[in-house]
Image (cartoon, helix red, strand yellow):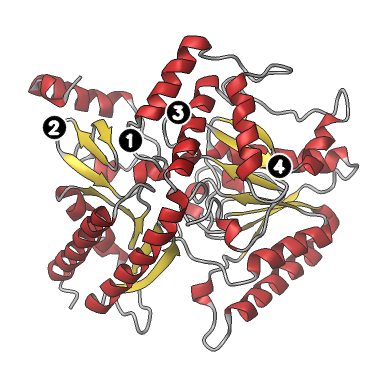
Amino acid sequence: MACSEWTDAEKERLREDALRLIIPHFANNENLARGPKIFVRGEGCYVYDLDGNKYFDSFATLLTTVCGHCRPEVTAAVAKQMQILEFFPNYEDAFTVPLVELARKLAEIMPGDLSVSFFVNSGSEANETALKMARQYHVARGQPHRFKTIARRGSYHATTLGGISVTGLPWFREFFEPLLPGCLFTPAVRDYERPEGMSSEQYAEGCLRELEELILFEKPETIGAMILDPLPGSNSGYPLPPRGYLSGLRALCDKYGIVLIFDEVQTGFGKTGKWFFCDHEGVAPDIMTIGKGFTGGFIPLGAAVTTPRIADVFRRGPGSELRSGSTYGGHTVACAATLANLEIIERENLVSHAAELGDYLRRRLNGLGEKHPIVGDVHGIGLLWAVVLMSDRRTRRELDPKLGVGNFIRDWCYRNGMILRSNGDILVLAPSLIITREEADLVLGLIDRAIGAAVEHFHLC
């Protein structure tokens, strides 16, 4: 139905029923009180709402639409598969051709020895599965006492009970405690937080020593896995790790027999200028979780991808199988859509495009700091960026959170035709990989004007 085909009465009924009949994911009651936003169409990097207003989406539909909206190649792939076989479950001993072809493709592009996939419906399910894989792996090898998992403060890993148990952000945890036992937390490791006068490599060494002390204190033979986002996501503002940290982490996990899990649900599939963030340091985990941009947002799908060394434990014979699954994991049409999405990424060289445009964004965003005193830090890589607002950049004094400066900037951008993600006073950019230089200039120009408007409104000069 085109926007013009809805009457005012029909639009009002849609808005009323949206509020009455649906609980949104991570609902924001303050925003909902202003009225729901209902989107009806997408094209490239743009979406249109119920009233026909056009918005540039600088957060790629929650980090999913890496190739933009409404790609005819994906539509054709989905339509073709729907006419052949719309669905058969990947259950017990059953497979479909798109599922096998997608597994082949992942084995080709994943780093290291990652080549065996367990398909699920989302990134949250992928992380839950990875935790279960690590646990059963140790049990199967006669080490059932390895039940503890190390995670990091400041990282987000899922909405499932297991996922929030290893999420180091209190807001996600507080209503659901007590959570799973055995979850240990180590500090967030952010290169921008290293002490003055210390090199990035030295800071990494110090963080790794602290982690090893935790492992020794807890007893290595009780620790089964460590899960981390090698580049933390939008909640933390994409802070880069210190140089050598990931490789040192890999060595520590090998030393103590700990399964290393990388959560690249947000950062995978070209967003950082390489297929995966861990490729920047040439480090591969034992299990990697993927989702979001993996499918391009066309149909839900996620995966936990592991190595033959891990997977073979579940193939030893009757009774050794991985005890996990769901009805729609590896959905036939979702696999067909994802194959088409990956083909677009490769054909249009979007990974290298993200790297090139990322350098441009870095320069321009740093320029905002020269113009606006409230721009404190700029973090990121490729097409994942965060602008951290501060009251005083020199002393690193934060803005008063009660002011809501970041939300003011977000709302200003929305009124002026752009969707911008704000996490408190962190402004987050994660556009589709197809974004052009001209569209990047549009985004940067709106953010520049929005920050200026905020400075004037809150008298922050």
Lower sequence index among marks 2 and 3: 2
User: How far apart in space, not on screen, are marks 2 and 4 (Cα)?
Assistant: 46 Å
The residues tagged by marks 2 and 3 sit, at their Cα atoms, a distance apart of: 25 Å
Q: Residues within 10 Å of mark 4 (few under 14, many from 20)?
A: many
Tell me what residue is drawn at x 82 percent, y 36 percent: 312
> Do residues under tags 3 and 1 come within 8 Å of each other at their CB atoms?
no
Identify the mark at residue 69; answer none if there is no mark.
1
Query: Horizontal and vertical percent for residue 216?
Result: 81, 66
Q: Bin the neighbour count of mark 2 within 10 Å (Cα to Cα): few under 14, some 14-19, many 20 and up.
A: some
Depicted 413 relative to depicted 402: above or below: above
The first of marks 3 and 4 along the sequence is 3
Residue that badge 4 annotates: 306
Question: Residue at 65% across / 20% down in the picture?
Answer: 90
Q: Which residue sits at x=35%, y=47%? A: 434
Residue 183 appears in the rendering? no
* Secondary structure type for disc 2: loop
Tell me the kind of residue under disc 4.
Thr
10 Å crowding of disc 3: few (<14), some (14-19), many (20+): some
State yes or no: discs 2 and 4 in contact (Cβ < 8 Å). no
Q: Is residue 130 left or right of residue 446?
A: right
Q: Residues within 10 Å of mark 1 (few under 14, many from 20)?
A: many
Rounded to the nearest whole Å, what is the CA distance between mark 3 and mark 1?
Answer: 12 Å
Q: Which residue is mark 3?
A: 299
**Pointer 2 residue:** 51
The amino acid at mark 3 is Ile
